Image (tube, grey):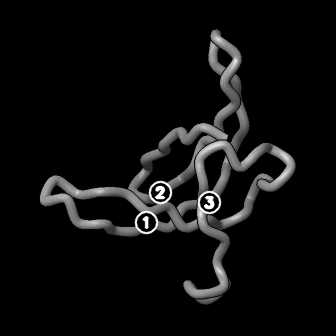
Amino acid sequence: MKRRMDMKKYKPNMGRANVVEGETLLFPFRTVSNEISKIIGEVVAFGETNDGLEYIEVNVGVKRNKRYVI
């Protein structure tokens, strides 16, 4: 696994061409206390919503997947 500093950071609308299945990404998010925290996740699938937005499905651990717009 790559070191945290070398890991690619997720950016909204980064495009499908910039992400591959199985890649590990770093996802920043805001906590309830308005602090920025980070979570590491592995891309497991690609998809598209009914209104045409492309997304990646990411395994963030503990049998939990999240979806992020690409």
Image location of residue 30, percent across then percent down:
30, 57
Q: Residue at x 71, y 49 (%)?
A: 14
Earlier sequence position, callout 2 versus callout 1 = 1
Q: Residue at x 61, y 89 (%)?
A: 3
CB under 8 Å between discs 3 and 1: no
Q: Is residue 23 above or below residue 64?
A: below
In this rendering, position of residue 6 left or right of residue 65: right
Q: Residues within 10 Å of mark 2 (few under 14, many from 20)?
A: some
| The furthest residue to the top | 50
Q: CA distance from mark 2 to mark 1?
A: 7 Å
Image location of residue 22, percent across then percent down:
74, 59
Tell me which amino acid carries mark 3.
Answer: Glu
Q: Residues within 10 Å of mark 1 (few under 14, many from 20)?
A: few
The kind of secondary structure element at disc 2 is loop
Residue bearing mark 2: 60
Q: Is residue 52 above or below residue 43?
A: above
In this rendering, position of residue 57 left or right of residue 63: right
Q: Residue at x 60, y 37 (%)?
A: 69
Residue bearing mark 1: 39
Numbered circle sitting on residue 42: 3
